[in-house]
Each structure stands twice: as C-alpha cells, then as structure tokens.
Image (cartoon, grey):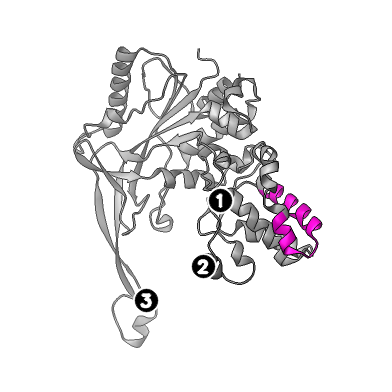
Amino acid sequence: MVKTPRFIQISTLSNYPAVLLNRDDSGLAKRMPFGGVVRTRVSSQCLKRHWRACEDEYALDNIDEGLSKSIRSRKVYSLRIAVPLTQEGYPEEVVKAVIMEFQKYLHETKERSSNEQSEQKEGVNLLDRSEIVVLGEPEINFLKEHTRKLCDAAGNDSKKAATLAKNYLRKEKKNFLALKCGAGIDGAMFGRFVSGDPDARISAAVHVAHSFTVHEETSETDYFTAVDDLIEEVGETGSAHIGASELTSGLFYTYLVVDVPQLVANLEGINRKYWMDADRALASKTVEHLIHLVAKVSPGAKLGATAPYSYASFVLAEMGNRQPRTLANAFLAPISLDTPDIFGTSLNRLNEHLKQTDDMYGAEEERLVACRREASFIEAKQVTLPELAAEVRKVIKA
C-alpha cells in the first residue's frame, strides 16, 4: 500500500445527452482536434468554476467551519476594505492612500502612470482593478486590519498615510504569506496569479485537464420558437421569437491530478518541503470533497433548456509518488460511433492502456475504482464512490 502519496490522479467517464456544456465566443460547443478527428470539449476553467460554485453537502464551503472560498472581483479592495473602513469614520482619502500603496506592492510591477490615474472615476472606484483579484477572507481581514492601523497613525493626512504604507507590507510580508489558507480554500486548490509580488502567487495544487469526448463530436442544431399567448386574440399568427442553438452529446473523459505536498503547503501556509511534518487533516478532507464534486457536479450552459445533470459512470483514483500521466491516449484512436456499447468499449480501452503502461514502466500506484458496472481493472479494487473518496482521505491523512 502507498503511504501518504505525493500525487492523487483522478480519471472519470461521464455521459451527457442533448446538452451544451461549454460554449465558445460564438455560442457553439467548444471543440478540439485529437487523434485525427474533432472532439467536443469542456474547458478546465469551466469545470473548476462549477466545482467552486457547488452548494451541496460536499461544497468547498463545507470542508471546514471558518474557512471559506476566495473573493474573486475587480472591486474587492473598494467594497470589502475601503467601504467598511470609511463607514467606521476613517477619512476616505486616507483609506484610499493606504490601499493604493498596498495594491502597488501586491499587484503592480510599476506605479500607475498619471494618465492612468486620471482616467479613473472619482471616489473609491479609483481602487478598482482592471483585472480580477483573488483574495481570501484571511487576507482581506489582514489588509483591513493593517489599513486601519495605518489610518490611525496618519490621522487626516493622506500624504502621511501613503508614506507610512509605502514599505509597510514589505515588513509584514512574512505574516501575510503565513496566513493559514490565506487565499481561500479554492485559491489553495487551483492557485492564484499576482502580477506584482511573486511570493504572493500560489501554485495550483489541483491540475485539471480539459475534458473531451472519447469519440468524434456529435452535434445537432436545435431550432426553437417562443409562442405569444395573446397573439390569436388580435387575429395574428406566427411566433414571438425564432432561434437556433447547438446541442451535443457524448461520453467525456476527464483527468485531474492533486499535488498533495503543494495542497498541504497552500492550506497550512508552509514551505512544501515540510509537508510530511504538517497537519494533513484539512488537505485530506479537501480531496475527499473534490472527488465527490468531480463525480457529481455537471458543467452546463442552457440549464433550463437541457437539464445537463449527470453523475460520472466511472471514477478511477490512482495514488502514488512518481510523476503523473494522463490516460487520455487510451482514446487517441476515437471510438466509433457505431460501437454498440461505447461505455464498455471505453472501459476496455482504459484497462488495456493501463496494462500496457504498467508493462512498460512498472506498476507503482495503488488504484481504486468506482463504476456502475463490474470493472476488472489492473491492480484496482472496486468500491463505491463514497468508499473511494473516504479511502483516499484516509491515505493522505496517514
């Protein structure tokens, strides 16, 4: 048995009929060429967004009481820091001066030009960023507390406030970076880019591939109308609206990897080289929740028109220490759409691909399978999905 693995690899197969899971800029289903044919695709950004937004029993907000998701907004500084402090009675210009210096340190490689500042609107909108900012509640509270402290020291002098704040975060950098789960539970999982201070960036601990169909794309244009309920009363005929939308169907392969040392480091606010000595309880529960989300949360545009809800029919968890590798190449040759049992054929493909990989590189990973039919996988124990998730949690925590 693998003890406290460095990597958890998750592979799933999920089937969807008549859906539009992820649209491109023209409103059509996203696609990708692979193995000489075009496949329907769901982007990793789309998958992660739906996992973050889920509100069921295994939602990220339910992993640990007191820990929450990050705030992702251009207006986080103005609405979550500046507005509360001005409501407490601190002068708006003093608050703004402190926060702008904090922004320069965290997000800007150089100070804003005078032209850029002049283009900003009056008031706290000057604090709004042009890009999404990802901050966790611990970080927001930290910045708010230290903004309040500097405002107290500056009084009504905004220039003094800016001077005091100019190098303040550099002195507090160690405390800022050491905040437990500082960027929020999702920031610890999926990472965060910060343009100014490289040390405030967070490496993603969960690596998510784009999902794709194991077969060639299948799509159809859905022609629809909206009927006017009152039009006949005035002797008219016809529809109030006519439109068209693309629908697709398919069996999707999804792959993701959890870098356990990085997840522990991100959640506990430590250097990843010390992950084995750290408390791994939170990381283990996070992965347990993630497995449930991956298996049961469906991405989907056009929710009201297609009800794109489906559970994964197959989930494979691999726990080991060597570099991960996707099983996507099991479907490099697309499965024919004429195949009577595409799901069964996909299981056989994955099994054969694993066997060939093990024959070439050796078998090192411990494997658990949850599947809606009997699946004899190479060196894999078949269990229920809750048992699979619980066992992975237990192994990480050990």
Foreground label between 1 and 3: 1
Residue 61 image point, x, y percent: 62, 43
For the point 61% across and 61% down, the residue is: 127
Give the camera-side residue of 102 and 254.
102
* Label 2–label 1 contact, CB within 8 A: no
Q: Which residue shows up at 34% across the image and 54% down it? A: 24
Instruction: State how far apart marks 2 and 1 are (Cα).
Output: 18 Å
Image position, residue 196 (x, y; %)? 54, 47
Q: What amino acid does circle 2 point to?
A: Asn
Q: Which region is colored magenta?
A: 140-163
Foreground: disc 2 or disc 3? 2
Q: Is residue 57 visible?
A: no
Q: Which residue type does callout 1 highlight?
A: His
Disc 2 is placed on an element classified as: helix
Q: Which residue is mark 3?
A: 228
Q: Does 272 sit above or below residue 92?
A: above
Q: Please, is residue 79 above or below residue 36 in the view?
A: below
Q: Secondary structure at mark 1?
A: helix
Quote the CA–CA distance across marks 2 and 3: 52 Å
Q: Which mark is residue 107?
A: 1
How far apart, in angstroms, are the residues tagged by discs 1 and 3?
52 Å
Choose the circle earlier in sequence order: 2 or 3: 2
- Seen in the image, is 85 located left or right of residue 249? right
Dominant SS in magenta: helix
- The correct choice, above or below, for 65 with respect to 370 in the image is below
Q: Please say whether residue 141 is one of the residues in the magenta stretch.
A: yes
Q: Tell me whether the residue at label 1 lies in contact with that at label 3, contact meaning CB atoms closer than 8 angstroms.
A: no
- Sequence order check, earlier mark of 2 and 1: 1
Question: At x 46% / y 19%, what residue is drawn?
Answer: 320
Mark 2 highlights which residue? 115
Q: Which amino acid is tagged 3?
A: Asp
Residue 341, horizontal then vertical, whole percent: 26, 32
